């Protein structure tokens, strides 16, 4: 296979994703999906599959970063493992099932859903919306249902679930530090189930490019993951020196711009 010059863009994307994830504590899917969609279209990949491939590749890339994040939060005692055990079965089923839904939705529908959800995330960041603690965590049945919902949405937008699970756990009177740490831990089953689902659903898809497994494009996966793992600790170190609240607002604006670019690339 002849080296594709477009591959040079993937380490740059990985650097941005890793740095922002470490700095702001957010998953990389919000950045990766719109940029990968645009890059895949520029490389001449089939329009009908670009968003599916962007979602699958992003989900696979999140596996390594979620392991790193989980270990860091566990070292600080911030992971509530009881919550992880109760919510994981629903997370696994919801995420895996969500990939089957995504594979049956066309590119336009997926792009619109992604953009609408990221607009919600951006508004949440801009307004610094934090739910007031008002109740306790539900029992096993309730946690399973919540896991199904978080997993399903996460599969459709290739995120680690933090934008949903952190507000939910904060609402249920879990300390913010524990909510963030626990969310980081459940990001791993989300990433694993999502990756498996996109591998299965895209396995026999016609017209996918070379070096693709299911809906996962391997050159992008490898180059984004390797660089993002190096850059994430750098971003984390700067998180204590820079005005993170202001940076989150800037990031929210960036998310909206990236989603607008993705929609323009698909519909334009």
Image: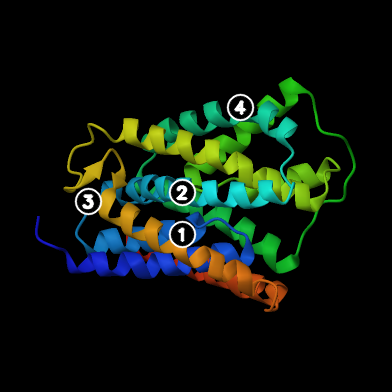
- Along the polypeptide, which appears first: circle 4 or circle 2? 2
| Front-lying residue, 132 or 219 | 219
> How many C-alpha atoms fall within 10 Å of the one at disc 2: few (<14), some, or many (≥20)?
some
Kindly identify which numbered label has been placed on residue 64.
2
Residues at marks 3 and 2 touching, judged by CB atoms closer than 8 Å: no
For residue 130, side relative to residue 251 (left or right): right
Q: Which of the two marks, 4 or 1, is nearer to us in this view?
A: 1
For residue 156, side relative to residue 199 (left or right): right
- Along the polypeptide, which appears first: circle 3 or circle 4? 3
- Along the polypeptide, which appears first: circle 3 or circle 2? 3
Circle 3 sits in a helix, a strand or a loop, which is it? loop
* Residue located farthest toward the top when viewing the structure as drawn: 141
Q: Which of the two marks, 4 or 2, is nearer to us in this view?
A: 2
* Residue located farthest toward the left when viewing the structure as drawn: 2
Residue position marked by numbered label 1 in the rendering: 229
Q: Which of the two marks, 3 or 4, is nearer to us in this view?
A: 4
Relative to 114, is 182 above or below? above
Residues at marks 1 and 2 touching, judged by CB atoms closer than 8 Å: yes
Residue position marked by numbered label 4 in the rendering: 90
C-alpha span from label 4 to label 1: 28 Å
Q: Which image quadrant for residue 216? A: top left
C-alpha span from label 3 to label 2: 28 Å
Q: Which image quadrant for residue 84? A: top right
Relative to 147, is 260 above or below? below
Q: Position of residue 81 (x, y in %)?
A: 71, 34
> How many C-alpha atoms fall within 10 Å of the one at disc 4: few (<14), some, or many (≥20)?
many
Q: Position of residue 80 (x, y in %)?
A: 74, 38
């Amino acid at each position: 296979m002849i080296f594709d010059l477009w591959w040079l863009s993937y380490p740059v994307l990985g650097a941005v994703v890793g740095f922002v994830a470490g700095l702001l504590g957010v998953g990389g899917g919000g950045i990766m999906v719109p940029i990968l969609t645009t890059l895949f279209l520029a490389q001449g990949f089939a329009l009908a599959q670009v968003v599916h491939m962007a979602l699958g590749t992003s989900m696979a890339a999140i596996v390594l970063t979620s392991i790193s994040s989980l270990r860091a939060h566990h070292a600080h005692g911030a992971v509530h493992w009881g919550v992880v055990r109760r919510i994981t079965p629903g997370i696994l089923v919801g995420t895996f099932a969500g990939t089957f839904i995504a594979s049956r939705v066309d590119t336009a529908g997926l792009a619109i859903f992604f953009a609408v959800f990221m607009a919600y995330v951006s508004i949440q960041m801009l307004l610094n919306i934090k739910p007031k603690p008002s109740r306790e965590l539900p029992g096993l049945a309730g946690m399973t249902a919540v896991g199904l919902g978080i997993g399903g949405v996460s599969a459709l937008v290739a995120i680690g679930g933090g934008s949903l699970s952190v507000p939910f756990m904060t609402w249920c009177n879990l300390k913010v530090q524990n909510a963030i740490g626990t969310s980081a831990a459940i990001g791993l089953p989300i990433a694993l189930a999502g990756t498996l689902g996109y591998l299965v659903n895209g396995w026999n898809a016609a017209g996918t490019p070379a070096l693709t497994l299911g809906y996962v494009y391997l050159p992008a996966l490898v180059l984004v993951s390797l660089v993002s793992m190096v850059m994430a600790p750098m971003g984390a170190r700067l998180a204590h020196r820079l005005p993170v609240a202001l940076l989150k607002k800037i990031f929210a604006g960036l998310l909206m711009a990236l989603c607008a670019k993705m929609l323009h690339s698909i519909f334009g």
